[in-house]
Image (cartoon, grey):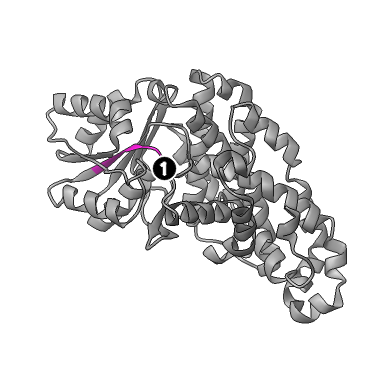
Amino acid sequence: MENFVAEIHDLFKTCSCGNHHNDIPIETIMAENGALNKVASFLAEKSFISPKIVADSNTMTAAGDKLTELLNSAGLAVTSCEVTPDENGDVVADEKALVQVLLETGRNSDCMIAVGSGTIHDITRFCSATLNIPFISIPTAPSVDGFTSLGAPLIVRGVKKTFQMTSPIAVFADIDVLKKAPKEMIAAGVGDMIAKYTSLADWKFERYAADVPYCELSAELTQLALDECVANIEKIAKAEDEGITILIESLIKSGIAMLVFGQSHPASGGEHHLSHYWEMDLLKNNRPQVLHGAKVGVTTILLSSIYKSEFLNELDNILENGEIQAKHGKVLANLRENKDKVKEILEAIPDPESTKRLIENLGGPVLPNELGISESLVHDSLKHAHHLRDRYTVLKFLNVVLQTEYDFAAKA
């Protein structure tokens, strides 16, 4: 991974998408045993003397305490902020957590260190950008792909919104720490990678339906990371060094693909919108949260079935429907012009049963009821989740264009 960023910068020269590629400010990526031991020397090289560790009670135990000792031994004035959980015991990236970290960090810290998984990184990313100081990523579980991205998904007044903030300047992924993560978090990491099946399909569909910016390089990076993960499911399931290294590297690469493009399109489509809708409902009803990767793994299976049965199998009929054409002529004209490409996109989504087996190999959930998600919430999310983001996904098409044709949610 150490040369990966340089390789991506070289690939910029070969990409013909015509979009502006964001520079990658990540200076160091280490995914190896004992990576925690390299943090102090990196801080010294950068002349940082007052780092602020942001963690929760679990991640302090997993890596934060050891890191504190290492930094203290190096003569650094390290302090920490342990984010307070909510009444359900969950650490949530909401206004309360953001204010706590901002107040406890103050103006004396010269860098921040996110020690945790997705939520801790989202909180740190926002606070780092707000305070205009850099942050460093220390993943404690290979559970999400957001370690290296710009986006910080936050809950603001009960609504899930993603803010484009900043990426870390370094990532130290210690395999000795990551392989000790709970198995459900490893399964969640695979779930977040599996989600690329539908996120990439949605982005490619959006490219043809709504003529949105598209980057072949970002899409290819995401696809390669997904393929590497899926090809090594058995090794990942063993939670040994090789498998965990493959998983965390896949997640990091997916995050960098988002960073290159500047938005989350390569790795977040309709399946993430459903997940966000479920998360908001759980918060609204004061219910415990569910791992992000577990949710998007389940929603990917759900959308894979719908995209193939309710869209791919009906595409020819949809394109020839005069009533639909009268109302949505531009979109249908775009799709008719690119019909073969759209079919290829949807045909490339694996059969949902095969995706189920992949996740089941890791002991992960594959059905909404395994997450405590009711049938009524599934149906509501299928009808309304597309409003959460300004994306022209297949999910949005089914709702906006085909709303008068049938209730596809009832068939889910």
| Numbered disc total | 1
Depth order, front residue of 112/23 = 112
SS at mark 1 in the image: helix
In this rendering, is residue 35 above or below 293? above
Q: Which residues are magenta?
A: 112-118
The percent coordinates of residue 195 (x first, y second) are: 60, 44
Quadrant of the rendered structure where residue 95 is? bottom left
**Residue 223 appears in view:** yes
Identified by mark 1, the residue type is Gly
Lateral position of residue 240 relative to residue 209, left or right: left
Q: Quadrant of residue 358?
A: top right
**Left or right: where 131 falls relative to 362:** left
Residue corresponding to mark 1: 118
Secondary structure mostly seen in the magenta stretch: strand
Q: Do we see residue 389 in this rendering?
A: no
Front residue (pair 107, 363): 363
Residue at the far bottom in the pictured view: 326
Relative depth, front residue between 58 and 140: 58
Task: Name which residue lies at 78% across and 51% down.
Answer: 308
Q: Residue at x 62, y 55 (%)?
A: 376
Percent position (x, y) of residue 36? 31, 26
Q: Residue at x 26, y 57 (%)?
A: 130
Determine whether 333 is above or below 53 in the image.
Answer: below
Q: Is residue 290 left or right of residue 114?
A: right
Residue 256: x %, y % from top left: 48, 45
**Badge 1 density bin: few <14, some 14–19, many ≥20, Cα 10 Å:** many
Residue 222: % across, % down: 58, 44
Q: Is residue 347 magenta?
A: no
User: Residue at horizontal 59%, vertical 21%?
Assistant: 235
**Does residue 401 appear left or right of residue 237 in this picture?**
right
